[in-house]
Amino acid sequence: MSQPLHKRCRRVLRTFARREDGNIALETLIIVPILFWAYLALFVIFDAYRQHSINQKAAYTIGDMVSREDRALTPAYMTGTRNLFDSLARSATPSSVRVTSVWFDAANNLYVCDWSESIGTVVDASITQVENWDTILPVMPNFERITVVETWTRYEAPFNIGIADHDIHNFIFTRPRRAPAITWEDASANCA
């Protein structure tokens, strides 16, 4: 004797629901793309963090190197500085380096730019820019000088997951070590 259609369908569905032999393949099919995406996202995040760390260490090295100079800096020195930064940072794209000599005027409570020179796509620091650095430069005694080294390089993510391509900018300040101030070879080179 045949059963009504709805009872047969219900019985087939119950039997299908109780079976467990195909669940692992189905779960794997669902979870593998998610795991793959998560792995790539973690790889990109780790790579970006690593590149930021390498760039910061390279910028500190350049800042320390400049702070130990007792002779005037030259355009050839700046070219060598950028080449060294590119080598240390393992930069795939051309970088930019800017060195600025700054002193503090306590009477007017502002930072004054002695000179600024750059190599790459950035321009020399302006007087207005240096005056606006009051929130990021340290408290200094009157007429104290520091050298600010800024570096820029482009980070290009290996995969377009989570982090877009962006510029890495480092701002490093160091007190001159062997001389009262770091000078530029052309005494007339001032901030604009």
Image (spheres, rainbow, N blue to C red):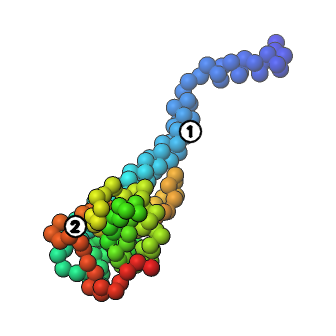
- Report the disc number at residue 71: none
- Which label was assigned to residue 176? 2
Q: Residue at x 15, y 69 (%)?
A: 178
Residue 22: x %, y % from top left: 56, 30
Residue situated in front as seen by the camera: 44 or 120: 120
Residue closer to the observer: 61 or 40: 61
Residue appearing at x 59%, y 22% in the figure: 19
Q: Mark on residue 30?
A: 1
The residue nearer to you, when weighing 161 against 69, is 69
Q: Is residue 80 above or below residue 40?
A: below
Q: Name which residue type carries label 1.
A: Ile
How many numbered discs? 2
Q: Residue at 35% across / 65% down in the picture?
A: 105
Instruction: Name the residue type under label 2.
Output: Pro
The answer to whether residue 168 is left or right of residue 186 is right
Tell which residue pokes out farthest to the right in this image: 4
Q: Residue furthest front?
A: 107
Q: Specify the quadrant that holds the C terminus.
A: bottom left
Quarter of the picture holding the N terminus? top right
Residue reaching furthest to the left: 178
Mark 1 closeness class: few <14, some 14–19, many ≥20 residues within 10 Å: few
Query: Is residue 12 visible from the viewing direction of this image?
Result: yes
**x then y, percent, for residue 63:** 27, 66
Neighbour class for label 2 at 10 Å: few (<14), some, many (≥20)?
A: many
Q: Tell me where residue 134 sits by quadrant.
A: bottom left
Please, what secondary structure does the residue beneath circle 1 have? helix
